[in-house]
DNA sequence: AACATTTGACCGATT
DNA sequence: GAATCGGTCAAATGT
């Protein structure tokens, strides 16, 4: 018997921390100065009213999104001039794509580790763990004929029940597991999945528990689906799947700096700040704390709700989805 | 019987 | 050239 379920709500926001107008080399690398931080809205938000903060945050988010987009273009341009590509975060979701990779030949059999594994490359400074983030990069997959094919690699971190050993991340697509491996730098095994529509769909994903936090799993998607997301019951996006599945509706904010995860399902807590590399500057931590404040979160939620309800396409789709869930009368 | 998952073996890349 | 590692294959097993 099919009962009505909660409609999935999963918002992945990919916004960067504010960048300066004329990026210096250091800033191009994602670093921020104290002046940047001091002038950021987060540092002042606490002293203003919620309404003011809300408005300001909205404006700032727009600005930051624009910055992020420019940064994306810039980094993409930089990497396009190099022999390998690994460029900017791009906060799009997984859209069905018809052009990405050749349907008949999945991801190249072997790729360099540099481009293959964006999480830990195995070199000396690789202990960066970007837990809680949603990151998407394009990498070039070398083909046997010497050319390269660009594929999208997206990393998503999700919180799941620590006792759940299945490493199943429900993301709306159907997957077939084809392997599992214990890797050197993580005691928990890494599971390999292929899209159930393979070989026509070239997408693969790797899922592995975080070494530091066993309640977090890191899923790495390679390629883009060339088919629509299946809509059968039970295949809900990870953030909304209930019943022991991955739970949180989380928003990750990252731009080469620390990762901030806002778990909107929790009251008061649910905020996690993870340094992307080494130790974060104290000021940065302060900003992160302020970003994690109830005021900021409330403003964020308010803005998202406004954006979504103001989007005609979204409301139409939502209405259609609700109607589908209702029994026929 | 059919399909999905598990798991050891294998392969190619890297060190 | 050997050791190591990550990724994949495919037979065995489970549902």
Image (cartoon, coloured by chain):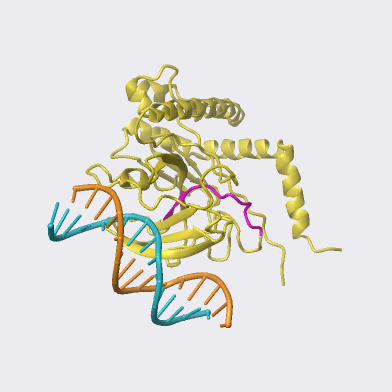
Chain colours: A yellow, B orange, C cyan
Q: Nearer the viewer, residue A68 or A183?
A: A183
Instruction: Say which quadrant the N terminus of chain A sits in.
Output: bottom right
What percent of the width, then of the height, locates residue A112? 32, 46
Q: How many marks?
A: 0
What percent of the width, then of the height, locates residue A156? 47, 49
Residue A216, placed above or below residue A47: below
- Residue ID at (60%, 27%): A55
Q: Point out the stretch of residues depicted in magenta.
A: A217-231
Give the residue at the far top of this rendering: A22
- Residue ID at (38%, 46%): A144
- Residue ID at (53%, 26%): A66
- Residue ID at (63%, 51%): A228
Q: Is residue A277 left or right of residue A202?
A: left
Q: Is residue A44 left or right of residue B1?
A: left
Specify the principal SS of the magenta part: loop
Residue A12, placed above or below residue A234: above
Q: Nearer the viewer, residue A193 or A275?
A: A193
What percent of the width, then of the height, locates residue A253? 47, 38
What percent of the width, then of the height, locates residue A290? 45, 35
């Amino acid at each position: 018997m099919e009962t009505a379920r909660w409609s999935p709500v999963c918002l992945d926001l990919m916004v960067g921390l504010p960048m300066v107008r004329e990026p210096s080399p250091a800033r191009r690398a994602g670093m921020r100065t104290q002046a940047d931080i001091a002038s950021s809205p987060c540092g002042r938000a606490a002293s203003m009213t919620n309404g003011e903060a809300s408005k300001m945050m909205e404006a700032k988010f727009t600005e930051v999104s624009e910055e992020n987009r420019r940064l994306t273009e810039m980094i993409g341009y930089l990497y396009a001039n190099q022999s390998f590509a690994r460029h900017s975060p791009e906060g799009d979701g997984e859209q069905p794509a018809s052009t990405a990779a050749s349907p008949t030949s999945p991801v190249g059999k072997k790729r360099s580790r540099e481009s293959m594994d964006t999480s830990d490359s195995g070199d000396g400074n690789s202990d960066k763990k970007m837990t809680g983030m949603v990151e998407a990069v394009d990498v070039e997959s070398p083909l046997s004929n010497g050319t390269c094919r660009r594929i999208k690699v997206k990393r998503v971190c999700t919180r799941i029940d620590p006792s759940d050993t299945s490493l199943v991340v429900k993301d709306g697509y159907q997957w077939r597991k084809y392997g599992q491996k214990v890797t050197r730098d993580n005691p928990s095994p890494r599971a390999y999945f292929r899209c159930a529509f393979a070989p026509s769909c070239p997408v693969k994903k790797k899922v592995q528990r975080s070494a530091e936090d066993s309640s977090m799993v890191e899923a790495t998607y390679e390629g883009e689906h060339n088919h629509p997301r299946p809509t059968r019951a039970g295949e809900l996006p990870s953030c909304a799947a209930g019943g022991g599945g991955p739970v949180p509706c989380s928003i990750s904010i990252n731009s080469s700096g620390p990762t901030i995860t806002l778990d909107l399902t929790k009251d008061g807590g649910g905020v996690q700040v993870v340094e992307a590399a080494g130790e974060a500057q104290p000021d940065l931590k302060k900003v992160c704390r302020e970003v994690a404040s109830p005021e900021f979160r409330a403003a964020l939620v308010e803005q998202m709700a406004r954006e979504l309800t103001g989007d005609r396409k979204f409301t139409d789709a939502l209405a259609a989805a609700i109607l589908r869930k209702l029994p026929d009368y």
